[in-house]
Image (cartoon, rainbow, N blue to C red):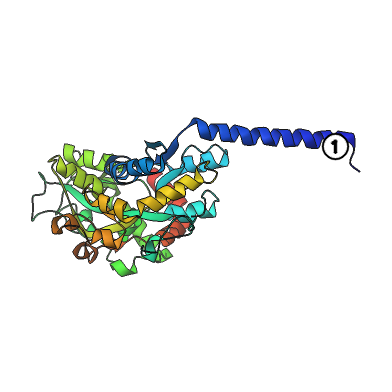
């Protein structure tokens, strides 16, 4: 029976809901569309090639911020207080975010992926640029011809002496460690218990020589150029950017861990439709061709990559000669092994 009391309660609830909706709309209008990435060379490229032109094209201001943190995406979505409308993530987070209900599905009625290789297209994210985690080194300590050229060399502290730096997450380290342990590039995945056991054994072997476990992309290049470490894993674009400044840093694409940068939309963004339009622009011929001019990260659109000069092409891991010796990061498999072994990794770092 619908009593007056229930009717009033219902009306009050509807009023609260309407107020909340209006409040959310006001919040959306009170801040500009916000894009979050990792900083440094990558953010500079994305701002210049994607965000600034998209802002002009759609007549909407875009705020660029960094660094990206997956924990913040999770916290924002769960608190229903999303501050980032578009984010650049490692591809493994597409699957982690999907499974945790943190991401909006891509709207392929807005995003045209007809010219993009299917590898770069997923249900919850679209890749917009390519890069790699590489072996980088200080050129004052290791001149040309005497530098490390493999993860086996990275682990050889006698032939290649000096402190190391490695990433503070299990991914990249798993791949590097099993390659150092003799696993072939095409057999890195799936991450079986046996391979993970090998990875942790190799990481325990190198751990006494790791001075810093880096978390921000700027760190390894800073450590290398200052001479605090001799060798480290680093993001290719950061090394290329440092070389433009004549810093004593170099890298090899041999056994590079090749990956793509993916754009995702945090669930609950008040600018979801605009985010889809920005993604669509980022994979356009115009935007992808503009990527080439930054000399740090490569395009995902094949027709744009084909426009690279020979000198430009050699800078990117997607260059055929570089890819022949790279280990291609399998984002879905990485998401699986992180779910299974990440706690063991945290314990390893604390031990």
Q: How many marks?
A: 1
Mark 1 residue crowding within 10 angstroms, few (<14) / some (14–19) / many (20+): few
Instruction: Let me know if residue 115 appears in the view.
Output: yes
Q: Vertical placement of 295 versus 23: above or below?
A: below
**Residue closer to the observer: 92 or 106:** 106
State the residue at coordinates (38%, 45%).
349
- Image spot of residue 300 (x, y percent): 31, 58
Q: Could you tell me residue 211's position as x and y percent?
A: 26, 41
Residue tagged 1: 6
What kind of element bears circle 1? helix
User: Could you tell whether 17 is left or right of 168 in the image?
Assistant: right
Q: Residue at x 50, y 30 (%)?
A: 30
**Residue at the spot 55% in from the left edge and 51% down from the top edge:** 101
Q: Quadrant of residue 307?
A: bottom left
Relative vertical location of residue 11 with respect to residue 128 in this rendering, above or below: above
| Horizontal and vertical percent position of residue 155 | 23, 55
- In the picture, the quarter occupied by the C terminus is top left
Residue 8 in the image, given as x and y percentages of width and height: 83, 33
Q: Quadrant of residue 341?
A: bottom left
Q: Of all residues shown, which one is farthest toward the top? A: 30
Depth check: give the residue in front, 204 or 49: 49
The answer to whether residue 132 is visible is: no
Indicate the quadrant containing the N terminus: top left, top right, bottom left or bottom right.
top right
């Amino acid at each position: 029976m619908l009593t007056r009391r229930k009717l009033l309660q219902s009306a009050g609830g509807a009023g609260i809901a309407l107020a909340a909706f209006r409040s959310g709309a006001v919040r959306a209008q009170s801040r500009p569309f916000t894009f979050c990435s990792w900083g440094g060379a990558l953010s500079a490229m994305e701002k210049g090639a994607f965000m600034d032109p998209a802002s002009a094209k759609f007549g909407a201001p875009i705020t660029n911020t960094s660094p990206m943190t997956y924990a913040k995406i999770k916290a924002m979505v769960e608190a229903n207080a999303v501050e980032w409308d578009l984010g650049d993530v490692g591809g493994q987070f597409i699957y982690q975010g999907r499974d945790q209900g943190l991401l909006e599905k891509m709207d392929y009625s807005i995003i045209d992926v007809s010219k993009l290789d299917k590898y770069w297209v997923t249900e919850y994210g679209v890749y917009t640029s390519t890069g790699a985690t590489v072996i980088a080194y200080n050129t004052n300590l290791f001149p040309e011809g005497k530098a490390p050229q493999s993860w086996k060399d990275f682990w050889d502290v006698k032939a290649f002496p000096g402190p190391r730096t490695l990433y503070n997450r299990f991914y990249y380290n798993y791949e590097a460690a099993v390659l150092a342990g003799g696993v072939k590039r095409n057999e890195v995945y799936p991450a079986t218990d046996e391979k993970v056991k090998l990875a942790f054994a190799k990481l325990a072997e190198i751990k006494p020589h790791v001075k810093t476990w880096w978390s921000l992309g700027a760190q390894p290049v800073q450590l290398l150029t200052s001479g605090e470490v001799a060798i480290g894993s680093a993001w290719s674009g950061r090394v290329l950017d440092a070389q433009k400044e004549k810093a004593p840093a170099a890298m090899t694409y041999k056994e590079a861990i090749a990956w793509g940068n993916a754009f995702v939309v945090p669930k609950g963004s008040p600018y979801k439709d605009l985010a889809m339009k920005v993604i669509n622009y980022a994979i356009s011929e115009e935007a992808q061709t503009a990527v080439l001019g930054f000399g740090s990260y490569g395009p995902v659109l094949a027709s744009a990559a084909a426009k690279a000069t020979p000198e430009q092409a050699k800078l990117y891991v997607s260059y055929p000669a570089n890819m022949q010796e790279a280990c291609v990061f399998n984002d879905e498999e990485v998401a699986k092994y992180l779910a299974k072994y990440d706690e063991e990794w945290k314990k390893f770092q604390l031990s």
